[in-house]
Amino acid sequence: MSGAADREAVFPTRQSLGLMKAKLKGAETGHSLLKRKSEALTKRFREITRRIDEAKRKMGRVMQIASLSLAEVTYAVGGNIGFQIQESARSARFRIRAKQENVSGVLLPTFESYLTEGNNDFAMTGLGKGGQQVQRCRETYARAVEALVELASLQTAFVILDEVIKVVNRRVNAIEHVIIPRTENTIKYINSELDELDREEFYRLKKVANKKQQDVAAQDAEIKRLKLEQEARGKKQAVADEPETSAGPAELLEAEGDEDVIF
Amino acid sequence: MEGLFFNVNNGYIEGIVRGYRNGLLTGANYTNMTQCETIDDLKLQLGPAYGDFLSSLPPNPSTSSIAAKTTDKLVAEFRYVRANAVGSLAKFMDYLTYGYMIDNVALLITGTLHERDTRELLERCHPLGWFETMPVLCVATNIEELYNSVLIETPLAPYFKGSLSHQDLDELNIEIVRNTLYKNYLEDFYQFVNSHPDMVGTPTAEVMSEMLEFEADRRAINITLNSFGTELSKADRNKLYPSFGMLYPEGTLMLSRADDFEGVRLAVEGVQDYKTFFEAAGLGGGAGGPGNMAGGSGTEGKTLEDMFYQKEMEISKGAFTRQFTYAIVYAWVKLREQEIRNITWIAECIAQNQKDRINNYISVF
């Protein structure tokens, strides 16, 4: 994995640790969601690929039949009726409705074909001869177009899904291989920095405590020494000079007592 | 007696046309053609008959270009014959072209209705239906002008006059217009072969009557079958039936009342040929039409259309057994058209690799 350098530029504080943790959690949830989405899409994608394969084969067959039926028309009518057909077509009989289908948040356009009723534009073409063939040819071509529409809708879905799956996979991979490790690294870094700070603090506190203890000990020792000195001195003076033991107040009392004596 | 002076004017034409008839593809040719694997092979097989016309095609030509080239040959030969024809034969051959002219005029009407540049349409017109003043029709920008110029400039004026006005020439009716014209044309042609002094009582009148009657019946039956499920009313339909033919008048009356395939079958019951056609077609899925969901893959047996073509070819072939008649020109054109259709069909089957139905062509020689 990437080294310590691959982390976000944050100050190692408790707040950013919290943020990072939230981010990691978010990234993990997002990752699992996206993974599931990608799987759903891939499943769909495979299904569409299979259906495209089927539709293409079907189209091949239908188109073959259709072009043969056109040949039949040419045979029966004995000439080219293309222009006649083109000109007598007024409104579309075969129409397409575009719909949207939602597959795990991806909007896939699907085309739905339908025949408009009562629209029989060139029903009379070939009235004299070949009319039946013309009608049959139309039916066959309507079916061919139906197959084409189905194929078109599948192909569009195929292209869109392909794109989306790529994007989703890129995101999944980005989250899995970049964002999560980086966030983890950052958290690790923050943790280590915080630990470092903690240790430093602890050491400092220990040092301070030590110093305090030393100071206290030194003071105690001083006091003790003074006490001892005093005691030693007191014992000496207690015999020689009593008031000397208590310095100030004793002297004052003594002085007052002295004045009292004067009165 | 009728043959006595026939060759004075028409002997050369008859010889030429009989020669053309011998140039038609035979059953053996067709069998060879169906064995072809590619269009190029087919082109090679067509070499003897169509070599000079097909040679300009690139390798692996499309079926439509083959069809166009084979049609070119027919047109070239027809023009040659027409150029050499004199007198009533010339008139007869003009009558032959009127049918194509109707298609061309219908095409131009459609173009004018949709405000297309009709000059572009001239290329799409059938060359046999070409008449000198056809480009004049392109000047017309609206339907009324077109109607007037058709009346003035084309030989079709009598077919328009009296039965159609310019109000009839709207989009909905274009097929009805076409079929009305065709009906008038057939009647006129029938009248012509049976009344012209050069033809009355000759084999021409006999053979042509048979052919035109068949054509009239076929149209009547087809119109009836194809009009099921459309907005064409029975009264309108009745107007499109030619007023002659083997079915006329009882059969046509019954046809005009028919509602379905069964009705048509009943109507044609009186004529043995059609009865057998309908029996055969009835077994093989019948009328088909708009409701047929089997699509192009169905119809294993012969369709009604196929049988009509077969019959037409047999009549045409029979025409060559007669001598001193104009009808062989008509028969030859029909045979050649069928040949072009056959070639196109076979080429299409080869191009699409659908050999199972390649034998659907009609060969009578």
Image: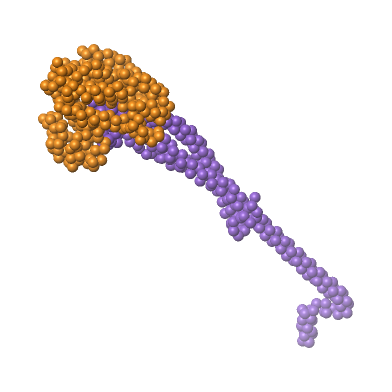
Chain colours: A purple, B orange
Asked whether residue A21 appears in the rendered view, the answer is no
Residue at (31%, 18%) from the top-left corner?
A: B365
Residue B285: x percent and y percent? Answer: 32, 18
* Outermost residue toward the bottom in this view: A262
The answer to whether residue B75 is above or below residue B21 is below
Residue at (22%, 13%) from the top-left corner?
A: B271
Q: Nearer the viewer, residue A55 or A136?
A: A136
Residue at (17%, 21%) from the top-left corner?
A: B6
The answer to whether residue B331 is above or below residue A82 is above
Residue A174: x percent and y percent? Answer: 56, 48
Residue A49: x percent and y percent? Answer: 48, 35
Q: Nearer the viewer, residue A87 or B4?
A: B4
The answer to whether residue A148 is above or below residue B10 is below
Q: Quadrant of residue B55?
A: top left
Asked whether residue A245 appears in the rendered view, the answer is yes
Residue A29 appears left or right of B58: right
The answer to whether residue B1 is above or below residue A211 is above
Q: Quadrant of residue B118?
A: top left
Residue at (23%, 31%) from the top-left corner?
A: B79
Q: Quadrant of residue B219?
A: top left
Q: Nearer the viewer, residue A82 or B3?
A: B3
Residue A232: x percent and y percent? Answer: 87, 74
